């Protein structure tokens, strides 16, 4: 990528497959985006670019790249496939370009404390943000990678679910459990199964995931 291509990319602004970071002061925020890209549809991280689309670059790109590579290898698992390139600016500064393809080994996690597996967190990309993945989204990521035929029985709880979705735009796990009079665990498992069966869609959120019917193509 040359400087003109970089400028054209920056003009697009941040989105589901593009994120800007001005510095590497907080590498944990950068690797959060790397994991989210890997767990979703891939993307590009530009380090040395501001949210205002200005491109000041990095003065010590070698040090910044070292910090990022070390953080990715130490805190991300399973290992994530990525590449790092540099774009030279006119004043001896550089922009780091991290390309992350969509992974075939989802879900990927960040493990803040390698000695404590319970601290692991997964992220997915929603618009221009990296959102922590709920238990349901993690199960959907696992199931999607399994690539197997999903079968389910259409019983009373599924009937109540589809009746609700016929009258409302969406439903959450807790609301489904209440509407159908079932445990949250069963509600969760049912919604995950219906997403994997391409009956429903999940819309991840930092607050609470929403489930909707899948549009007929």
Image (cartoon, helix red, strand yellow):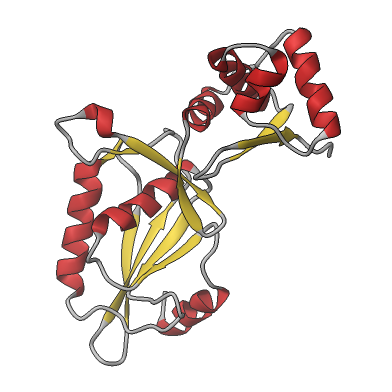
Residue at x 39%, y 77% (from the top left corner): 50
Vertical comparison of 208 with 33: above or below: above
Front residue of 80 and 120: 120
Front residue of 85 and 192: 192
- Quadrant of the snapshot with the C terminus: top right
Front residue of 108 and 154: 154
Front residue of 145 and 28: 28
Relative to 57, is 7 on the left or the right? Answer: right
Residue at x 48%, y 82% (from the top left corner): 7
Vertical comparison of 10 with 112: above or below: below
Relative to 16, is 51 on the left or the right? Answer: left
**Residue 104 image position (x, y, % from top left):** 46, 35
Vertical comparison of 119 with 7: above or below: above
Whether residue 154 is visible here, answered yes or no, is no
Residue at x 63%, y 17% (from the top left corner): 190
- Quadrant of the snapshot with the N terminus: bottom left
**Residue 209 image position (x, y, % from top left):** 58, 37
Whether residue 175 is visible here, answered yes or no, is yes
Relative to 169, is 29 on the left or the right? Answer: left
Residue at x 46%, y 38% (from the top left corner): 133
Q: What is the residue that sits farthest to the bottom in this orientation?
A: 91
**Residue 199 image position (x, y, % from top left):** 74, 26
Vertical comparison of 151 with 192: above or below: above
Number of disc labels? 0
């Amino acid at each position: 990528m040359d400087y003109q291509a970089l400028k054209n990319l920056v003009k697009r602004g941040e989105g589901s497959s593009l994120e800007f970071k001005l510095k590497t002061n907080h590498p944990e925020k950068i690797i959060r985006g790397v994991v989210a890209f890997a767990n979703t549809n891939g993307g590009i991280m530009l380090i040395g670019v501001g949210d205002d689309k200005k491109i000041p670059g990095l003065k010590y790109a070698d040090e910044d790249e070292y910090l990022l590579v070390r953080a990715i290898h130490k805190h991300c698992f399973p290992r994530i496939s990525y590449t790092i390139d540099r774009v030279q600016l006119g004043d001896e500064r550089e922009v780091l370009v991290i390309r992350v393809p969509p992974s075939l080994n989802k879900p990927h996690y960040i493990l803040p404390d390698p000695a404590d597996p319970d601290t692991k967190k997964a992220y997915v990309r929603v618009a221009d943000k990296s959102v922590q993945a709920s238990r349901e989204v993690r199960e959907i990521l696992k199931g999607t990678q399994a690539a197997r035929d999903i079968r389910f029985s259409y019983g009373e709880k599924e009937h109540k679910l589809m009746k609700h979705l016929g009258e409302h735009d969406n439903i959450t796990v807790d609301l489904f459990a209440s509407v159908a009079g079932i445990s949250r665990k069963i509600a969760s498992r049912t919604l995950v199964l219906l997403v994997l069966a391409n009956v429903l869609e999940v819309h991840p959120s930092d607050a609470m995931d929403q489930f909707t019917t899948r549009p007929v193509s």
